[in-house]
Image: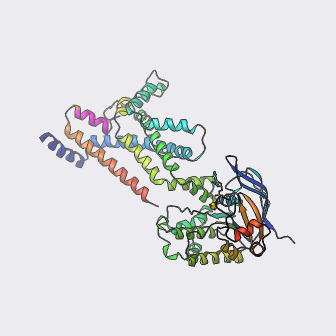
């Protein structure tokens, strides 16, 4: 019990003193997950919207893949990306293994199905009569799509939040493909694992608190986006 | 001289799953007229309006709007001349005034005094900034009408526009439609269950039964000396199939 209290106060001290090592880990986490989320969103929102709206060929099959993807165990994604990027793998020549790029690839694979699948569900939930109405008022195809996305925005934002939550807190994949190399690929979650194992509870707790705070702030920001009309 | 037709319809058929829903041999809609379509539930009235708004493609037959022969994709400048106030109004998750301004925004125009004027005309000026999701059914219907009128359409398609309104607002809406038609020459196709409303507003009235137009006649002839016995029965308020 003492250890926890002690660790907690030390954690606050570390955060307040803006420890450079801590700062580096936070910054890398944000960069990797931020880029992965950006990629997943730019791919996933339009694709989810298209699947939800258009009569797409083989929609049922694609949907089944997406929903399976939403439940992929991150560590399996990590294994897959590892094999793809390892020196003997098909993309080994890129030299991405144990770099932030590999972590971004893995996180995109985790977040993309979440963003696309939940966007599709949100878009399908929009009243079909709305599209008719908007078209009747003279909307182009793009304006119609935009109107539907706006109506579905609560669900679309939830999709993006779910994607972010899935990757910022994920440890299995980034551990495998990043390698948790200090100063290079160490992120919040992998650092927590390491520091817990080595008994550095203060640092582990500090990282945990920051991770929670980050997720909280990100969610508040997105909720504000949701509420704006 | 024959008055100029804005729509010319020939052998128009619309089927859903091989069921014929609209089957009109011939119908000319005149530029600047108010044409009322009456008929029992399920007759195909709303489907006809969707066809006239280029929102559905005919299974067979032809719709000619001015010089344009409708094929599956109507060009934007044609589509933007026609708009519908649907039976069940759909408003966007936004304020009342944003809803009314929506058609203008689609056309790259700014919200200006037209929006406020139109809201005042339908008696909703005080609700301009209220969220449209909070409105009553009758208020929503009036917002939908204001939204359609503000873009000054050439053709206005109205599907039961007063279904949810109290008598005062029914009178208000009818006056707005009449004035729009008289002062701007807007062609109006009005679908209504209410034969009295058709009588009050329309120049011509058509009876639709099971997808077919049984009779299209001037309002006075339709009500006073109908050509078809089914029209006479419908006007008397008897159910017709
Ligand atoms: N998209 C659709 N798919 C299948 N059937 C449809 C579709 N739209 C309409 N129908 C059918 O076509 C018929 C005519 O419908 P429509 O809505 O045009 O009738 P209506 O005359 O407007 O009726 P009401 O007065 O009740 O509004 C109905 O039997 C309806 O079930
Ligand atoms: Mg109808």
B50 or B31, which is in the foreground? B50
- Number of callouts: 0
The C terminus of chain B lies in quadrant: bottom right
Q: Quadrant of the N terminus of chain B?
A: bottom right
Q: Is residue A94 magenta?
A: no
- Give the residue at x 49% y 76%: B126
Report if residue A186 lies within the magenta region: yes
Q: What secondary structure do most residues of the magenta stretch adopt?
A: helix
* B202 is higher (above) or lower (below) than A92: below
Q: Is residue A70 left or right of residue B204?
A: left
Left or right of A45, for residue B48: right
Give the image location of residue A73, x and y in percent: 39, 33
Residue B6 in the image: state x and y as whole percent: 77, 65
The magenta stretch is A183-196
> Regarding ligand 1, which quadrant of the image does it lie in?
bottom right
Q: Is residue B212 left or right of residue A210?
A: right
């Amino acid at each position: 019990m003492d250890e926890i209290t002690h660790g907690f106060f030390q954690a606050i001290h570390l955060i307040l003193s803006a420890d450079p090592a801590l700062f580096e880990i936070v910054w890398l986490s944000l960069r990797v997950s931020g880029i992965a989320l950006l990629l997943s969103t730019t791919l996933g929102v339009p694709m989810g919207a298209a699947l939800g709206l258009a009569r797409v060929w083989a929609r049922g099959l694609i949907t089944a893949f997406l929903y399976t993807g939403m439940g992929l165990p991150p560590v399996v994604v990590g294994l897959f990306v590892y094999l793809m990027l390892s020196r003997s793998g098909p993309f080994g020549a890129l030299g991405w293994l144990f770099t932030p790029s590999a972590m971004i690839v893995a996180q995109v694979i985790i977040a993309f199905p979440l963003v696309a699948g939940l966007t599709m569900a949100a878009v399908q939930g929009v009243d079909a009569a709305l599209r008719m109405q908007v078209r009747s008022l003279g909307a182009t195809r793009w304006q119609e799509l935009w109107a539907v996305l706006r109506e579905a925005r609560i669900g679309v934002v939830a999709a993006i939040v779910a994607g972010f939550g899935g990757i910022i807190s994920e440890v299995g994949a980034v551990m495998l493909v990043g390698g948790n190399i200090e100063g290079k690929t160490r992120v919040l979650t992998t650092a927590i694992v390491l520091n817990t194992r080595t008994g550095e509870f203060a640092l582990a707790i500090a990282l945990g608190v920051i991770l929670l705070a980050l997720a909280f702030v990100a969610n508040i920001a997105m909720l504000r986006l949701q509420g704006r009309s | 001289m024959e008055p100029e037709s804005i729509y010319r319809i020939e052998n128009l058929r619309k089927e859903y799953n091989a069921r014929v829903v609209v089957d009109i041999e011939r119908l000319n809609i005149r530029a600047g007229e108010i044409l009322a379509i009456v008929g029992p539930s399920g007759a195909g009235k709303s489907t006809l309006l969707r066809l006239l708004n280029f929102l559905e493609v005919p299974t067979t037959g032809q719709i000619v709007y001015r010089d344009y022969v409708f094929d599956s994709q109507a060009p934007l400048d044609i589509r933007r001349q026609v708009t519908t106030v649907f039976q069940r109004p759909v408003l966007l998750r936004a304020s009342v005034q944003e809803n009314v301004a929506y058609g203008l925004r689609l056309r790259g125009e700014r919200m200006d005094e037209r929006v406020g004027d139109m809201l005042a005309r339908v008696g909703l000026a005080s609700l301009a900034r209220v969220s449209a999701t909070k409105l009553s059914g009758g208020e929503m219907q009036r917002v939908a009408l204001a939204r359609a009128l503000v873009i000054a359409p050439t053709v206005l398609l109205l599907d039961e526009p007063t279904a949810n309104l109290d008598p005062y607002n029914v009178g208000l809406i009818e006056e707005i439609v009449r004035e729009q038609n008289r002062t701007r020459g807007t062609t109006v196709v009005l679908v209504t269950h209410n034969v009295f409303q058709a009588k009050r507003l329309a120049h011509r009235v058509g009876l639709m039964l099971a997808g077919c137009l049984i009779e299209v006649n001037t309002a006075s002839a339709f009500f006073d000396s109908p050509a078809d016995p089914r029209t006479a029965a419908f006007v008397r308020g008897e159910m017709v199939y």
